[in-house]
Image (cartoon, coloured by chain):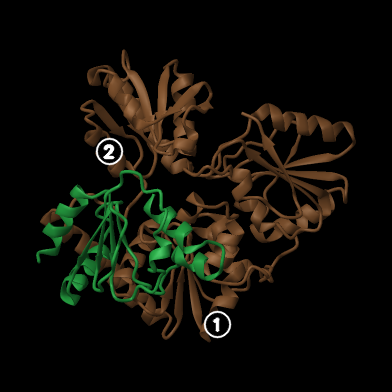
Chain colours: A green, B brown
Amino acid sequence: MDSRAYIEKVIQEFDIVLFLPDGFKGPMEQSAFDNLALEDRKILVLSTQQYDFTEGCISHRVVSEEEAGQISRLYYTYEFTDNFIMLDGSGIYASIFDFVTSGILSAGEAWQALLM
Amino acid sequence: MDKFHYGEMLENLNRIERDGLLQGRAVYLFGHCNATEELVDLLLERGYRVSGILDNNCSKHGTLYRGVVILPPSELIREAPSDTIVCIVARAYEVMAKQLRKLGYTGRVEKLVDYNSYAEYSLSEESVAGRQQRVERGIGQLRLMQAKYPEAYRVYCPFSALGDVYYAMAYLPYFLERKGIHNYVVFVIGRACGNVAAMFGTEHIEVLSQREMDEQIQAVLYTKDADAYIPHQDRPYVVNLYKALYSKLIPLETIYKCGVYGLDMACKPHRPSSLETYEGLEAIPEGRAVILSPYAKSVANIPREYWQEIISHYTERGYQIFTNAVGEEETLPGTLRLEVRLSQLQSVAERAGTFIGLRSGLCDVIKAADCKKIALYPDRFYSDTKWKMAEIYHLEGWENIVIPQ
């Protein structure tokens, strides 16, 4: 995959592209995604793992480790759009899911806020 | 909106006015936030009518700011595109412009502020190559810092805001203790933020320019530097902590304590340990003076008349009033000027007995002062959230007063 060309295509096609490489340890259980008010937002999830999303507006594609590496490097080079979100648990900065760990937000509230 | 970006907004507004893009058109703004409200103020001052503020947050629809209604973006399509212009001073220009095009809007969309040195909304080969050069510059700077502070953990405060640095420093010791770190250096932007970091007894502080900070942080991200941390709620672009505010009201201090550093709610902040006593204290009547702090870099001012009422009130009661000001900031009429170092401000407030300030990072710097403390808030929303500034920046132990528009 030419990661640059692929990302260019999907950020045009989707309202939000959510990239979950291997380091992501956040809440992915189905209950966290139940009843999200996503309205007519089109969301694409890219990940190295397989997930089952039952929310109709969420599309999903599994990428290889190599593809994930290319996408990650591009993401950390600069902000090429404001509708691409990467969650990798790098430990270099905090994430909205730290509020879930501390009990301030539920998993559903965190996903709702992130995907609004 | 901070002074730098306000200046940029003004310059671009002048430009589009000069180019005749506003006259005879229905003016819409997109994205309801503080910056947009400041643009409304400017446009109304210049005699323009603002037809509406477009916003995707349906809980705001139908509400008004100075008579300007907040509308769903789809309302724009009712007008002929040639008769309209949309001005954007909110942060997410690209996604907003894209949304308008998707709705079928073909009229003029003007970006009046560019907030973000990390961003270039293009994936062309030229853009990627240019940005990779920026990363290389940042890596070069990183190497220099690693040589200057061998084996030191690096903490980057990415935004030049006194309050942000204050909270970052107040809870940093817990974070470092958890990681077993004793050798660290704090990077800040500008001398004032360096002074705030120094108030906490920090041994190693590096003061950078905004550009140096942005480039080093980009390099930290690109190299996935395990010996660095960026304690902030919304900068740089990779940080999504602030989005929690779309779901729940979380005061700023809690955002730092529980979000940025992952600490327990019961955790108490460290207090500054390296404060100084102002050498001119004897000129301040003990317990019978008021220190006014009317200026803030990134907060809208409150009307001058309000400060005059405060001055009259306390003057009539025999208090000596001081204006805390620096550089070109004016001394309020009827007051004496006071220019003190940040580390001395607490001693001044405690000597005076009363501190009244426009809510800004300066209030955080003296939040533990033993005196009467009043924080004044403009009646505005925090960024593009549904929470008011007074709710996010609320100070415990202070009298928090919202000034109506």
- Picture quadrant where residue B213 is located: bottom left
Answer with the quarter of the image where residue B102 lies.
top left
Identified at 81% across, 58% down, the residue is: B370
Residue B78, image x, y percentages: 30, 20
Give x and y (percent) for residue B337: 71, 42
Residue B226 sits above or below residue B2 on the image: below
| Secondary element at tag 1 | helix
Residue B314 screen position, x and y as percent: 84, 35
Q: Is residue B237 left or right of residue B162?
A: left
In this orientation, which residue lies closer to the viewer: A54 or B118?
A: A54
Q: Which of the labelled discs sits on residue A33, or is there none?
A: none
Subunit ID for the residue under disc 1: B
- Residue on which disc 1 sits: B178
Q: Nearer the viewer, residue B247 or B241?
A: B247
Q: Secondary structure at mark 2?
A: helix
Same-chain status of marks 1 and 2:
yes
**Residue found farthest to the top:** B24
The residue type indicated by label 1 comes to Arg
Q: Is residue B8 left or right of residue B136?
A: right
Residue at image location 67% in from the left, 38% down from the top: B402
Return the disc, 1 or 2, that comes first in the chain's sequence: 2
Q: At 48% across and 41% down in the image, what residue appears? A: B1
Question: Gap in Å between the C-alphas at discs 1 and 2?
Answer: 44 Å
Residue B324, position as x, y percentages in the image: 68, 45
Circle 2 is placed at which residue position? B99
Quarter-wise, where is residue B378 in the image?
top right
- Residue B197 in view here: no
Q: Are marks 1 and 2 in contact (CB under 8 Å)?
A: no
Assess disc 1: are there few (<14), some (14-19) or many (≥20) residues with their C-alpha within 10 Å of its C-alpha. few
Which mark is in front, 1 or 2?
A: 2
